[in-house]
Amino acid sequence: MILDFTAILARWQMLLDGLTLTIQLALVTTITGFIIGTLCAVARRSHVVIAARAATIYVESIRNTPFLVQIFIVYFGLSSLGFSFSPVAVAIIALTINVSAYTAEIMRAGFDSIHPGQWEAGECLGLSRVQNYWHVALRPAIERVYSSLTSQFILLMLASSMTSQISAEELTAAANFIQSETYRPFETYIIVALIYLAISLLMRLVFWGIALLAFPRRRRLGTNL
Amino acid sequence: MSIVMLKDVKKSFDKLQVLKGVSFSVAPGEVMALIGASGSGKSTALRCIDRLELIDSGEIVVCGHRVNDPQLDLRKLRLDVGIVFQSYNLFPHLTIEENITLAPRSVKKISRAQAREIALASLAKVGLSEKAQNYPEQLSGGQQQRAAIARSLAMEPKVMLFDEVTSALDPKLTGEVLKVIEALAASGITMIMVTHEMNFARRIADKVIFMHQGYVHESGSTDILTSPRTSELREFIGDELH
Ligand SMILES: Nc1ncnc2c1ncn2[C@@H]1O[C@H](COP(=O)(O)OP(=O)(O)OP(=O)(O)O)[C@@H](O)[C@H]1O
Ligand SMILES: [Mg+2]
């Protein structure tokens, strides 16, 4: 077997466009997913029964169905409701819905790990429940579950490849197209796999940098919370 | 006018009645020692005063707030009451200074610079000025407890509640915390302290309440610690001295 990458590398522009969209999808949905997921975690822990129930139903139905099916439901659901979104917009919505559910579970574990004495101390100082979440619980919670969170967001980036199914022109979609033009599927997917690997490593680096900024205590003392 | 007033307060956890009709009051500037055997309801009484527990019946009035009123503005109550627990509960991700400035800034909306001044002043009061930039885990137990006291003081409460603040500390560190509380008492702040340190109570308290099985069994000046009227208090003091 002779591997020949020339035809694929000649289409570098297409790969670059796909790579760009993959990174954009990952970046946007990491942020939206983190925010919505955290709010769901708060809702799930809330004493407002309806909010807690609704969050539980959402989280459990997403975590127990395949992502590809969710993408199709969003895609066909939106169009049958009369909305016409671009494939990229649908991809962002579907990825956000998916990752928020997983993030909610991780953040819930983080909030649950905050000692009751901490909440009480904040309460006694006059902090409202929202302020308690914001000032007292959020940062230690994130710090405790940080490695799970970052893994989840890397998985999210990898899962974005499935949005090629609704023709979002991300990296995998580019690969699908290139291999059909070049008849070199093996080489094409090897290249694309290496690119995904590079993005994953880059994300790890970025998350490491964020941790340095977000957890000054850990940076200074080197201990875990 | 009393700063804290409890009238026939009853409180149960499920079937266990912990407070069976507790009444007492604390006047402005008064230092009250709350003593009694383990399980007699001392912590529960303190927690009810700051509305960390809801009472079943009776009345609690703290600095004019009717604590058991559903209309109560909880934030206002918490602004008037400072409470320090056995387990310091400092926020581990914040420096000592940030621990102290958090509530003045986010609850009282005081500027960063002003909050910093308040923090440094209250750290000076507890002798921890040089620890402002350290994290809680870098402090000894006694220092953490003093920082927790400073955090409460920074909100300038009208009454301070202390729940066995030294019982997690070894004797060497206990002294430094008691010294801080003694200085506070001398400064004229109203306080209620649950303590097992009988000599300390005798030295700084104006008034002693002895709780026994959910009731105030005996109360009076510190004299009751040297000459108890009831056999229960006599027995309790005897136990504590050993
Ligand atoms: N949240 C709770 N749920 C159920 N029971 C409780 C709760 N808090 C306290 N109790 C019970 O109430 C009783 C009184 O407890 P409390 O903590 O007020 O006693 P205490 O006088 O402070 O004792 P100690 O000296 O050991 O601190 C105990 O029997 C305790 O087990
Ligand atoms: Mg107690």
Image: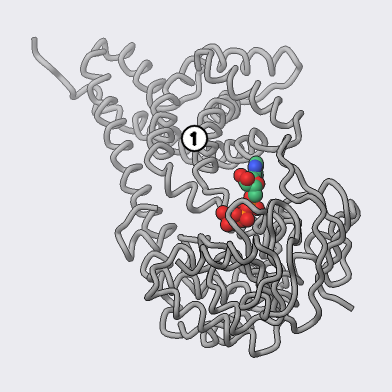
Q: How many marks?
A: 1
Q: Which amino acid type is marked by label 1? A: Ile
Q: Position of residue B240 (x, y in %)?
A: 51, 66
Q: In the displayed structure, would residue A193 be above or below residue A20?
A: above
Instruction: In this rendered view, identify the residue nearer to me: B115 or B111.
Output: B115
Instruction: In this rendered view, identify the residue nearer to me: B56 or B138.
Output: B56
Q: Decide if residue B174 is in sight here.
A: yes
SS type, badge 1:
helix
Q: Mark 1 points at which residue?
A: A106
* Scheme by which the image is coloured: one colour
Q: In the displayed structure, would residue A33 be above or below residue A219?
A: above
Q: Position of residue A123 (x, y in %)?
A: 67, 58
Instruction: In this rendered view, identify the residue nearer to me: A31 or B81.
Output: B81
Task: Report whether B96 appears left or right of A172.
Answer: right
Task: Report whether B11 appears left or right of B39.
Answer: right
Q: Decide if residue A133 is in sight here.
A: no
Q: Mark 1 lies on which chain?
A: A
Which residue, as the protein is rendered here, is positioned at the far left? Answer: A1
Local crowd size for mark 1, using a 10 Å CA cut-off: few (<14), some (14–19), many (≥20): many
Quadrant assignment for the N terminus of chain A: top left
